[in-house]
Image: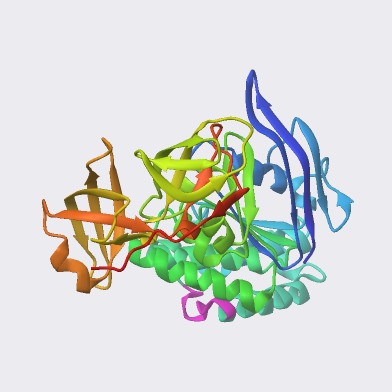
Amino acid sequence: MAQLAINNITKTFGDTSVLKGISLDIQDGEFVSLVGPSGCGKSTLLRIIAGLEEPSGGHIMIAGTDVTSTRASDRNLSMVFQSYALYPHLTVAENIAVPLRMRTMNATQRLPLIGRVMPGASDKAKEIAQAVQHAANVLEIDLLLDRKPGQLSGGQRQRVALGRALVREPAAFLLDEPLSNLDAKLRVQTRSEIAELHRRLNATFIYVTHDQVEAMTMSDRIAVMMGGEILQCAPPEVVYDDPDDIRVAEFIGSPKINILPVERTERDLFLFGQRLPLTAKLDAPALLQIGLRPEALRLTKTAPLMTGQVAHCENLGSEIFAQIALDEHTGRVVIKATPEERHKLSLGAKVGLGFAATDALVFGPKGKRLRDIEATACSVSEVA
């Protein structure tokens, strides 16, 4: 395994700029997810790392060696595609063995009949069979080696694709939305299997997905991409709790973070005309925005900061998400409540909301996080 460095990578297609100076260092054995909406450039970046696409500028370094101009086959990287890309006429064992046969056997040794009697072919075939068996044991598909892809479920096919990548013992694994073709139940199962595989191998994984749940549950770090740029790269809990940009805050988290307009006068912040227990150090008054996660909002009857009516309620058993139509604002906010609070959330019920000043995320006019914010008091009243 090896460290991988992406240095100021750009990519343009005609007049369209897809990647705008991407730089990212990935440590040996690290699991990094590239996450973002469709069209943000994450798959293009992965293909450039793999050598399947040429960058317009910048460099790719693997273990300190510049491989920007190196062919994909010579980069010692294994890529798992969204479509699995299995040969339907070959067995599972034969599919897994393909990269080893291409790497270790010459053209004559790979011939169906005469290749078996060529010098050295027998020994190489035994080594390949051992490597295939080892990969199958690791992925727990050793009982499927004689089957064809058409006889396998989606999850089993994905493990075969992983086995074909694993058998090469690459410097890094590149995975391009490998779970998008699976149903919801299989996605949950397979993502845990991928995470466990990463821990067992201690290998470098670069994982592309538009699904924030996949990124949050498997990654050491998440690189949030939008518009051909990395907005933030940090551990999942940091990206969720401490986003640098309002776009990151809105993309990560389900239900989506609540964004409300805040007015600043001198040092004080006002929400719907009500002073918040927060002060901001800015040169001039400005219209700001405040971000509140659903779990940050609390039901209260004592001096609420907002009031509204319950417009919709989703009971998930262990937790409840309610949409509150605010009296002071045309939009709605989503709150996370406990099952014990269900009786307060009947449709049309009038509720008051409060939150702790330390849970508020304040963003500037351009969407960048304002960190020079001070909490002067706690605005959460006793839950009633």
**Residue 33 shows in this picture:** yes
Comparing 274 with 102, the one in front is: 274
**Residue 112 shows in this picture:** no
User: How many marks can you see?
Assistant: 0
Identify the residue shown where x is 22% and y is 41%: 327
Identify the residue shown where x is 26% and y is 70%: 338
The percent position of residue 130, horizontal first and vertical second, equals 67, 79
- Asked if residue 128 is positioned above or below residue 368 in the image, the reply reads below
Please state, as top left, top right, bottom left or bottom right, where the N terminus lies in the image: bottom right
Please state, as top left, top right, bottom left or bottom right, where the C terminus lies in the image: bottom left
Q: Give yes or no for residue 325 being in the magenta stretch.
A: no
Q: Residue furthest top?
A: 15
For this view, does 366 lie left or right of residue 213?
A: right
- Quadrant assignment, res 30: bottom right
- Asked if residue 93 is positioned above or below residue 161 in the image, the reply reads below
The percent position of residue 111, horizontal first and vertical second, equals 68, 59
Q: Give yes or no for residue 144 being in the magenta stretch.
A: yes
For this view, does 281 lie left or right of residue 22?
A: left
Comparing 27 with 94, the one in front is: 27
The percent position of residue 160, horizontal first and vertical second, equals 52, 66
Magenta stretch?
Answer: 138-146
Identify the residue shown where x is 72% and y is 68%: 29
Comparing 18 with 243, the one in front is: 243
For this view, does 305 lie left or right of residue 348?
A: right
Q: Residue furthest right?
A: 65
For this view, does 380 lie left or right of residue 214?
A: left
Comparing 22 with 97, the one in front is: 22
The percent position of residue 248, horizontal first and vertical second, equals 53, 46
Look at the image and name its color scheme: rainbow
Identify the residue shown where x is 50% and y is 34%: 265
